[in-house]
Image: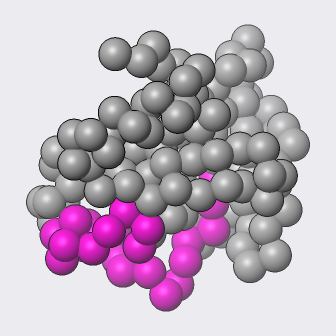
Amino acid sequence: MATLQLNHVARETDDVRRLAAFYEEVLGFERVASPNYPAFQVAWLRLPGTPGVALHIIERDPAAAPAAVAPGAAGAPPAQLPRRHHLAFSVADYDGFLAGLKARGTDVFEKTQPDGRTRQVFFFDPDGERPFGSQRLRFVS
């Protein structure tokens, strides 16, 4: 089994600036470098003393299904909601981890970030077939 390390937790919002300001001003998070996506806003934050774990605040996609409707509930693939709330882990052997997922028959969606270096695989946990409380897991290399 691959050794995992928590990479980030993503939080979706209609107002990235407002939510980022709350985490910065009220909870003491610090803003760190984030990608520049032309279609939506993001803010990457970290708590001092936790350099390996980030909070990703992502602008809600107005075209996506409401959060109460889990993508797995309708049988949609993990690619359907790439900006939703999710957990992200780092893994040293990305290719081996991906091969293990595929060997288990897990439906995956692979993506590379705009920097060209960050590869990701999205998939649903076992609760992904339920209409509420599903989480998408994302692993990055």
Q: Is residue 100 above or below residue 137?
A: above
Question: Which residue is outermost to the bottom?
Answer: 63
Q: Is residue 125 visible?
A: no
Task: Find residue 52 and report its image quarter.
Answer: top right
Q: Does the stretch in magenta take in 8?
A: no
The quadrant of the picture occupied by the N terminus is top left
* Left or right for 119, reference 76: right
Q: Which residues are magenta?
A: 57-80
Front-most of 136 and 78? 78
- Residue 23 x %, y %: 67, 41
* Left or right for 128, reference 86: left
Q: Does the stretch in magenta take in 60?
A: yes
Q: Is residue 66 visible?
A: yes
Q: Is residue 93 above or below residue 103?
A: above
* Left or right for 25, reference 19: right
- Residue 29 x %, y %: 73, 32
Front-most of 61 and 126? 126
At horizontal 34% and vertical 33% (from top left) the residue drawn is 100
At horizontal 37% and vertical 63% (from top left) the residue drawn is 78
At horizontal 55% and vertical 77% (from top left) the residue drawn is 61
- Residue 137 x %, y %: 40, 44
Q: How is the image coloured?
A: one colour
Q: Is residue 77 above or below residue 32?
A: below
Q: Is residue 39 above or below residue 72?
A: below
- Residue 21 x %, y %: 75, 50
The quadrant of the picture occupied by the C terminus is top right
Front-most of 115 and 135? 115
